[in-house]
Image (cartoon, grey):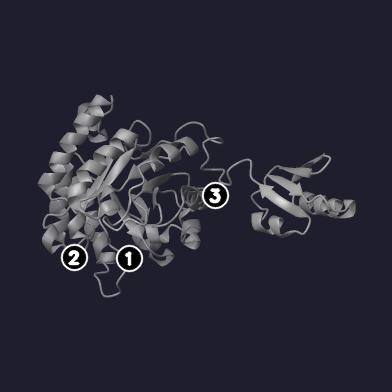
Amino acid sequence: MVVIIKPDAKKEQVNTFLGWVRDMGVETNVVVGKELTIVGLIGDTTKIDFDLLRSISIVDDVRRIQEPYKNANRKMHPEDTIIQLGERQIGEGFFHVIAGPCSVESREQIGGIAAHVKESGATFLRGGAFKPRTSPYAFQGMRAEGIELLVEAKNQTGLPIVTEIMSVEHLPLFEEVDIIQVGARNMQNFELLKELGHLRKPILLKRGLANTLEELLMSAEYIMAGGNRDVILCERGIRTFETAIRNTLDISAIPFLKSRSHLPVIIDPSHAAGMAWMVPALSRAAVAVGADGLIIEVHNDPQNALCDGAQSLRPEEFEALMGDLRALLGVMGKSLSADEAVTAE
């Protein structure tokens, strides 16, 4: 971090400022020029309030020379993070597809869909038990019973489960959940992120509706600062001025995040556009741009789904998409992790 001192600052004021910074355990390197005095801050500057520095009367400007996220930063961790979950590995070189309904609705529904997506090649089962909805009158999910049904489907199919958490109070219910999802609306629920940082369980962190990529990485930092290094980043579309589609899928987020961070990055094409017919094209784009996986909504009866039926693929549509993905991955010299597991057996 570099602090530029105003030209009219008095020597006593500068010395007081330097002493204040050093008291916080940060070393200083002072360069005095003809017109400007520049102070380089060396060490752990994460405890220094960026805005507070700027508000000091003798400070003209403050500039970062390194990103504020440390644990999620590729500069600090050049090797790609590979998350080990049982026999499955998540990260660069291991392409996974997480599939299932937006909401768990019944034992028959989640069990049937789980069997279909596994047969098509999905490696994880998704399903919402707690549902954050814009309207308080919309279906809010089956809650604890929904998680119980997900666990049943997991035991029947062998697919690890992914489901969203909305409150720290619900953590005891997630003991048998394999990957805990933090939804877009909770990306900056910092108290929740801190608690998830104490777990030893992968966290799938979705980008907020109108958040920057740096803010996404800073949210990942909250989790990692607590000791949990198994974070999966998810781009799910952001709100822009465009109204023709629900959200704008930021494909450029994938190469950007992979250049700045070592964490796995996946794409959610279902929530991006909110229309099932667009999901295959967006999924193929995700593969082409280098994503580590997809999270796709699949429902056996989309027209009568209790949540987000319009963006859900039917099982036969999902099966066709998986065929397309295998072909595209093959052209790129890659393969679905599910296929590799079958080969190994």
Q: Secondary structure at mark 3?
A: helix
Residue 198 got which mark?
none
25 or 12, nearer to the observer: 12
The residue identified by callout 1 is: 132
The amino acid pointed to by label 1 is Pro
Is 273 on the left-hand or right-hand side of 324? right
Q: Position of residue 76 (x, y in %)?
A: 56, 36
Quadrant where the N terminus sits is top right
Mark in front: 2 vs 3 = 2
Query: Do the residues bearing badges 2 and 1 touch, measured as CB atoms within 8 Å?
Result: no
Quarter of the picture containing the C terminus is: top left
Question: Quadrant of residue 288 in the image?
Answer: top left
Question: Between disc 2 and disc 3, whose residue precedes?
Answer: 3
Residue at 23% across / 26% down in the picture?
330
**Within-10-Å neighbours for mark 1: few <14, some 14–19, many 20+:** some
Does 209 sit above or below residue 202?
below
State the residue at coordinates (21%, 47%).
Answer: 278
Q: Quadrant of residue 135?
A: bottom left
Disc nearest the viewer among 3 and 1: 1
The residue tagged 2 is 306
What amino acid is at disc 2?
Answer: Leu
Q: CA distance from mark 2 to mark 1?
A: 13 Å
Q: Nearer the viewer, residue 259 or 167?
A: 259
- Quote the CA–CA distance across marks 2 and 3: 37 Å
Residue at 25% over, 33% down: 336
Q: Is residue 248 above or below residue 284?
A: below
Say which label, 3 or 1, has the lower sequence index: 1
N-terminal of the pair, mark 2 or mark 1, is: 1
Give the residue number, with chain letter if any, for mark 3. Answer: 225
- Residue 128 position within the rendered picture, expressed as x and y whole percent measured from the top left: 27, 59
